[in-house]
Image: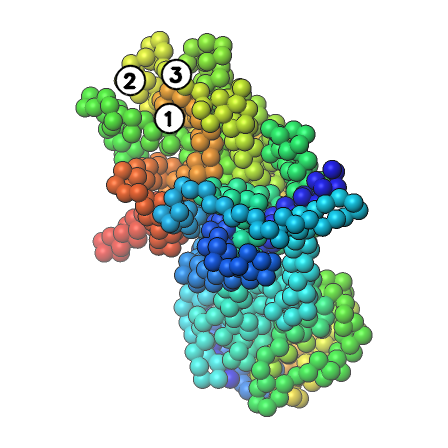
Amino acid sequence: MILFQILTALGTASSLFLVAAGLTVIFGVTRVVNFAHGSLYMLGAYVGWVVLSHLPQTIFGFTLGCLVTAAIIGVLGVLIEICILRRLYRVPELYQLLATFGVVLIAGNVVQLLWGTRVVTLPRAAWMQATISVSGHPFPVYSVVMMVVGPLVLLALWLLFSRTRWGALVRAATEDREMVGALGIRQNILFTTVFGLGAALAGLSGALSLPQVAATSQMALSAVSDAFVIVVIGGLGSVTGAFLASVLIAVLQTFGAIIIPQYVMVAVFSVMAVVLVLRPNGLLGRAGKGGRAMGDLPKLVEGATKLVIGLGVIAFIAAALVPAFDTGYVLSIMQDALIAMLFAASLHFVMGPGGMPSFGHAAWFGIGAYGAALSASSWNLPMSESIVFGVVTASILAALVGSFMIRLSGIYLAMLTFAFAQVIWALATQMTGFTGGDNGILNLWPDGVFASPTAFYALVLALCAGGVLVLRRVLFSPFGFALRATRDASARAAASGIPVGPVRHVAFTISGGFAALSGGLFAFAKGSVFPTYINVSHSIDALIIVLLGGIQTMAAPVVGALVYTGLRDYLQAATTIWPMLLGIAIIVIVSLFPQGIGGAAEHWWARLGSRAKSKGG
Amino acid sequence: MLEISKLVVAYGQATILQGVEFQVRQGEVLALLGRNGAGKSTTLKTIMGLLRPVSGHISFAGQNIDGIDPFRIARLGIGYVPEERRIFNELTVMENLEIGRQQARNGHAWSEEELFEIFPNLGGMRARRGGAMSGGEQQMLTIARTLMGNPSLVLLDEPSEGLSPLIVEQMAEAIQILKRRGITVLLAEQNLHFTEYLADDAVIMEKGRIVWSGAMKSLMADATLQARYLAV
Ligand SMILES: Nc1ncnc2c1ncn2[C@@H]1O[C@H](COP(=O)(O)OP(=O)(O)OP(=O)(O)O)[C@@H](O)[C@H]1O
Ligand SMILES: [Mg+2]
C-alpha cells in the first residue's frame, strides 16, 4: 500500500516537475516570472485532449499525441515570446509579470469560449489500466509511465544543458546575460528558444496528465501556484532543484491527502517556509540570483504637487456628494472603488516604498473579511467591533508570518506571499464547518448608526480616504524615510543605524492591517464573504491597480483603482469576452506605459512644465 | 580605426562622461589613463554598447556604432574584457571559451590550443569551473574568451588590477603578442608603469573629460603631468 502511494507520488512529481522545470529555466535566462506557465499547462491539457481523441488508443498513439501537443504548445510559447515578452525585457520585472498575467486572462477566456465550463476528461485506454507486477503488487502501466517520465526529462535536460553549445549558452545567460551579449551572442534567439522549450514541457505535462487529471479552466492558476512553490523550494533557475522539490511536494500532497486532507496546502506552505528560512535561495539556488530585489523600480516621487492635492480634494468632495444623487447602483460602485483604493494603497505601501512585492495581498483582505464575518455571525459582535476584530487578527498574523517573510526579498518574497494566500484560500474553502466553504458566510449587515446605506457609505468614505491619508502620512514620517532607506540600500541603511529587520516587519504588519480593514468593510458592504475574496485574481487586481497607477507615484492606488475598476466593470457589463479584452488592455498598457499611467502622466506633466518654462524664459 | 567624438554618458541624473573625444589608430596600443572614478570603465562600456550615450558618436572602421546592440558591436570585431572579468562561474574553462567563439575574421580564427600557448596555465585546467579559479587565472580566461571572437579591436579594462607581479608580467606579454598579431588594443589603466612599455600613445582622462593626449614617451618624460593627473 505504502509502495503504491510512493509510486503515485512519483507520478505526480513528474507532472509537477515538467511544469516547474520550464518555469525555472525561463526565469533563469530571461528573468521573466511567467505567470502564464500554468496556462500553457492548461492549454496542453485541452489541446492534448483534442489531439489524443483523434489518435488510436495505444501506447504509441498516446506517446505521439503527447509529443505533438508539446510541439504545438512550444510553438505557442515562441509566439508569445516574440509578440509580447520581447518588447518587455527592458521594463521592470513586476510589469513583465503583469503582462504574463494578461496572457493568463486571454488563455482562460479562449478555453472558456471553446470548451465552456465543461470538465474535459480522457478515458483511460486499456493499455493504461493493464498492470505490471512489482514485487508482487500490481501497478497500472500508466502510473509507471508517469513515474519514469520525470527522471527521463531530467536526464534529457541535463544532457541538453551540459553537452550542447546551446545548453552552455543557456547556463551562461542564466549567470550573466549582458556578458553573453557582449560576446556576440544574439540574445533574442536564445530567449525565444528557451521560452519555447519551457512551454513545450508545460504542454507535455498537460497532455500526459489527462488520464488522471480532467482539464478545467481552473487548472491554470493551481498549476502555476504549485510550480512557484517548487521553483522557490528548489532554487530559482535550478532544474535539479526543481526535480527534488517536485518529489518533496508530490510526497507531501499524496500522503497529506491521506492523513490531513484539509491541511495539505498548509503542510506544503510550512515546508516551503522552513526550507526558505534555512536556505533563503532554495535547495540548490545560488545566492544573489533570484533573491535580487525587484530590480530597477523607480524611486518614489517626493510630496504631492498643489495640483494633485487640489484634484484629491475635488475628488473627495465629489465622492461625498454621491449619496445626494443616488443611493443605489452608483453608491455601491463608489463603495467598491473606495474599498479597492484602500486595499491597493496598503499593497502600494509595502511594495512601493517598502520594496517588498506581494503576489498574495488578498490573504490579508480575506483574513479581515472572514475575521469580521465570523466574529459577527458566531459571537454576535456589532459591526464596528467585528471589523476591529478582523483587523487585529490580521495584524497579529501578519506580525507572525512577517517574522520570516521579511527575510526574503524580490521574486522569492513575491512567490512566498502568493503561496501564503493560496493557503488561506484553501483553508477558507476546505474548513466548511467553520467558514461555510464555497457557500461563504451570509447575512452580514451594517447595524446601529451605520444601518442606512448613506451612513455606511459615509463610514466607508471616511475610513478609506482616511486610511489612504494615514498611510501617506506614515510614508513621510521618519519611519517612512527609514523604510525607503531599507529598500534603496539595505546594507547602507543598516550601517547608518536603521534597524532594517524591524522596520520592514512593522511595515509588513501595518500593510496587512490596512488590507484587513478594507476586507472587513467589504464584507459588510456586500453582506457576505466568500473564498473568492482571497483568490489569486483578487491579489492580482490590487497588483494591477498599483502598477497601472505607477508604483513610484503616491497617487498610484487612487488613479489605478479608478481606471481599473472602471474598465473592468464596464467591460464585464458590456461583453462576455471581457477577460480577453482586459488581458489585451493590460498588455497594451504595460507596453505603452512601462511606468504606469500615473508615472506617464507625471512624465508628461513635467515635460509640459519644462516646455512652458523654456518658452517663458 | 575607432573614433569617439563629443561623447556624453549619464547614469540617471549624474552625467559621467562630458564630451569625450579621442581616436585609436589601427594596430596601436592606446593607454586610457586616469584616477579612480575618472570614467575609463564607463567609456569602454559605452563603446561596447552596454551603456547608451546621451549624445555624441562612436565610429568603428568607418561605421557608426553608437546605440546599437552589444552583440552586433561584438560581431563587427570589438572584443571587451571587463574590469570585473565576468567569467561564467558555472561553466568550465572550455565552455567559457566556447561561449566566446565567433566566425573567423580576415581568414584567421583563434583556436583553444593557440590560446593555451599564450596562457599555459589555462591549458592545464580545461575542465575546471570558472568559479574555482584564482583571480589571475580568471583574468587570463577573460582575455582568451574574448579572443575566441576573433576581434580586431580589444577593449581591456584594468587587466593588471589586483594581480601578483608575476601574473602582471604574463599579462603584459600577452598584450605584446596581441599587438604583434596586429590587434588594436584600447587599454584602460591606472597603473602607469604597466602601460609604459606596452602603449604607443596615451590619453588621460579626468572627471569625464580627456585632459591630455600624446605619445606614451612624452608622458613618461613629463613628471609634472604624471603628478597632476595620475596617482604615481
Ligand atoms: N552604475 C553606476 N551608477 C551610478 N554611477 C556610477 C555607476 N558606475 C560608475 N559610476 C560613477 O561613474 C564615475 C566613473 O566611473 P568609472 O567606473 O567609469 O571610473 P573608472 O575610471 O573606471 O574608475 P576605476 O579606475 O576605479 O575603475 C564614478 O564617479 C562612478 O562613481
Ligand atoms: Mg574602472
Q: Residues within 10 Å of mark 3 (few under 14, many from 20)?
A: some
Q: Are marks 2 and 3 on the same chain?
A: yes
The quarter in which the C terminus of chain A is drawn is bottom left
> What residue is shown with label 1?
A464
Residue found at the far left of this picture: A325
Tell us which disc is closer to us: 2 or 3. Answer: 3
The chain letter for the residue carrying disc 1 is A
Q: Are marks 1 and 2 in contact (CB under 8 Å)?
A: no
> What residue is shown with label 2?
A453
> What residue is shown with label 3?
A443
Q: Residues within 10 Å of mark 1 (few under 14, many from 20)?
A: many
**Residue at 67%, 43% in the rendered image:** A9
**Residue at 32%, 45% in the rendered image:** A577
Q: Is mark 2 within 8 Å of ligand 1?
A: no
Left or right of A325? Residue A224 is right
Name the foreground residue: A140 vs A213. A140
Q: Which mark is residue A580?
A: none
Name the foreground residue: A84 vs A289. A84
In the rendered structure, which amino acid carries the disc numbered 2?
Pro
Left or right of B69? Residue A232 is right
Give x and y (percent) for residue A84.
41, 58
Give x and y (percent) for residue A137.
75, 44
Give x and y (percent) for residue A141.
66, 51
